[in-house]
Image (cartoon, grey):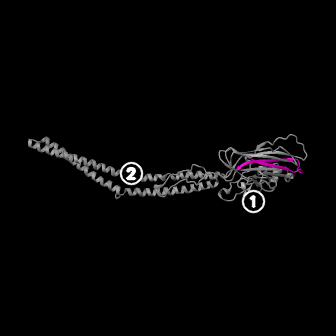
Amino acid sequence: MTTPVVLLSAAPAFADAKPATPMLNQPKTYAELEKAAADAEKAYGDAVAAKAAGLKKLKAAMAALDLDTHPLKAAALAHDAVAKAAAADKTAADKALTDAEAKLETAKDEAGKAEAKKALTAAKTDAKKAADAKADADAKKEAAWEAWNDARVKVSQEYSLVQDAPEKALKIKEAADKARAAAAECVRVSGLTVLADGLPSKIVAGTTVDFSFTVTNGTDRTLNVDPLALVVLRERKNWDFLKVQWSNGSGWQELEAKGNSYVASIDAMKPGDHSDVKMRLTIDAAATTGKGVGQFAGDASSQYNPCLLGPMKRYDFTVLAAGSKPGKVDDAKPDTVDDKDRPTPKPSPSAQGGTSAGPAGTSATPETAIANGGDLATTGSSSVLPQLALAGGAAIALGAGAVFIVRRRKANDS
């Protein structure tokens, strides 16, 4: 539902009412879901009012039609009287014919027979006229009553247009409310994948490594995608010795060590499209042996439903002391972050025209969680939430100086 939703049309005058008609296109943004729910609420109220007005009109129309003074009923009653008189005339004519036949049978002489035959001929003529008059009167009577009954049927049919509308509108309203409620939960989109390439499983302090991660839109719809990258050295003593950069295509941009940065969003990724985000990690020679972790995901822009989250990949690596000779080093192996451990943004109010709010954090501080070897994705800090007001629904606060969040800026910011 990418256009305003007309869920039901039911005018107060139920003769013009129309049944509920759900839209063929489903809403994609939270604002559209909000509007769909509001439209459905109004449509349901209109349907209830239309049914009440229709029932009132039905009763009034039926009562009017039942009055003997109503033109249709008055005409039918008049034809009743004519048909009744015609029936009486036919009965009398039939009796006169029977009497004339009897007189002819009892006539004694030729003169009497001639007179009886003449009377019988006249009686037959009168009987035929009476029968024809009765048939005509009966037909007009039937037509008059049929016209009266048709008027009653028409009134009932008009009411039927709005009789079931509230039930249909209620189903649409409940579906719209359910869709809006479901939108409060981020949707997991398995086809929106990310895979890192060239991130070593071991990095010697005092060196720089270049790697990238590829975002692939394996869904069946075109999406605007916000790549998300989180990199941290686990040991507290090494936190200040990590520098992370990303390439905007013409140079390297350093991410703020104590904040969040966004890189150009990938707009209008068609199904099957992929895009590379080039990264660079520099670990200072002063860093000691320890562990590091990178986590990457491709989240759709906060405009969607209101959020679509791709699966997050995790890559663990080891930091070796400066001057170490690691020999042949393989790339870090990907591991999927459990859904329960994955940062889950709240629905973004920006989809409704407001400012975006940051995600719900956990009670643990980044220092405590990382120092204890906890998953990066489970850390959070309320102190950085004000900085996330511009993060849409997808930025995740993971600790001062410990985590870097990467998302592309709009093209004009690059």
Please report the bounds of the magenta region as a residue range: 276-299
The amino acid type of the residue labelled 2 equals: Asp
The amino acid type of the residue labelled 1 equals: Pro
Toward the front, the furthest residue is: 250
Q: What element carries label 2?
A: helix
The residue depicted at 41 percent of the width and 57 percent of the height is 61
Does the magenta segment cover residue 280?
yes
Q: Residue 386 carries which label?
A: 1
Residue that mark 2 sits on: 150
Look at the image and tell me in which quarter the C terminus lies: bottom right
Where residue 277 sits: x, y (%)? 76, 48
| Prevalent SS, magenta region | strand
Judge whether residue 109 can be spotted in this image: no
Query: Of 172 and 271, which appears nearest the observer?
Result: 271
Q: Is residue 169 left or right of residue 88?
A: right
Q: In this view, does 52 lie above or below 329?
A: below
The residue depicted at 42 percent of the width and 58 percent of the height is 60
Where residue 163 sits: x, y (%)? 48, 52
